[in-house]
Amino acid sequence: MRGLPAPPPLGSAALPPGTFTGRAVLVTGGGTGLGKAIAAEFARLGADLVIAGRRIEQLKSAQEELAAVPGAGRVTAAVCDIRDPERVAEVFDAAAAAFGGVPDVLVNNAAANFPCPAEDLSPNAWRAVVDITLTGTWFVTREFGRRHLAAGSAGSIVNMGASYAWTGGPGYAHSAAAKAGVKNLVETLAVEWGPYGIQINGLVPGLFPHADMTEDIRGGLERAAPDDKDTRQPALRVGAPRELGWAATFLASPYARFITGHTLVVDGANWQRRSLVNPEVIPVREQLGRGPFIP
């Protein structure tokens, strides 16, 4: 068995050089992790970038890193809590001041997540995830759409999703419900806004290990696959963050203009994996190392 081949090296691009030259791209959660990796691929193709997030230190570090990507345009950073529509509007105002108009592309990457048995989820925990992952995504999407509609200009949106929007996600009831809502926004707005030149698609990442993974996610991966994560994927390897960036740049590019309302899963078929004989069921509480539920 060999699995799927390794991707081309970092710095490669599937699209022509300069595909996004003169175009502005807004990436929420662009200061770390997969959001930064996606932003880097847009930068490599000449885009001007606005990266938004809640922590100025991370944003400033990412701004310097992205500005140094060969081919990058201008890079600006904006502190924003996407749960606040007024702060969201300020980010778009800052983008207009920096680049002269509404960003051409929006990547809704910002989200919140942590594993928890459903019965242990407090109202605040539920709201924290849903308000960022679904409502925050909607606030940014709405602002992008309204400004393009007012200007009569075309635009492209890429919403980051999750495969448990289809399958459900034991241990992630809050996030799975929110991501199902995000997927539905893709399908609804593709029809509503297509006549005005606004396309919207979803992008679902599989396992892309990176330095900014939170400790709870890192710990869960280590418990599930302490020795070898590669052999637990049908591709016999995990993903490289640049592969997700390549998918995002394609969906937002002129070469994908007739693709809208679609959610692309980039996970080496892992979410479709089935066993001939299912493994033993281990309750989520036990998987997370929690004792019996006590009301």
Image: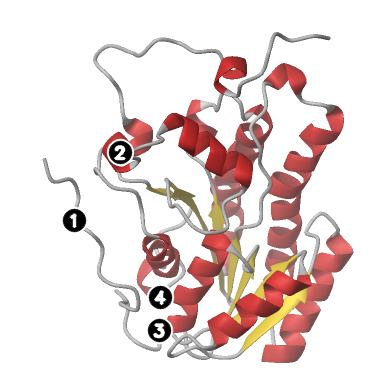
Image coordinates for residue 111, horizontal then vertical, percent: 66, 50
Q: Which is more toward the observer, 36 or 192?
A: 36
Note whether 188 is above or below 28 in the view shown: above
Quarter the N terminus occupies? top left
Name the residue that disc number 1 marks. Answer: 5
Tag 1–tag 4 contact (CB < 8 Å): no
Q: Earlier in the sequence, mark 1 or mark 4?
A: 1
The residue lying at 28 percent from left, 72 percent from top is 9
Quarter the C terminus occupies? top right
In the picture, the disc for residue 254 is: 4
The residue lying at 74 percent from left, 10 percent from top is 293
Tag 3–tag 4 contact (CB < 8 Å): yes
- Marks 1, 4: nearer the viewer: 1
Instruction: Kindly report the distance in space between the C-alpha atoms of the residues bearing marks 1 and 4.
Output: 27 Å
Q: Earlier in the sequence, mark 2 or mark 3?
A: 3
Name the residue that disc number 2 marks. Answer: 233
Circle 1: is it few (<14), some (14-19), or many (20+) Cα within 10 Å? few
SS for callout 2: loop
Q: Which is more toward the observer, 102 or 65?
A: 65
Image coordinates for residue 55, horizontal then vertical, percent: 76, 66
Q: Can see residue 151? A: no
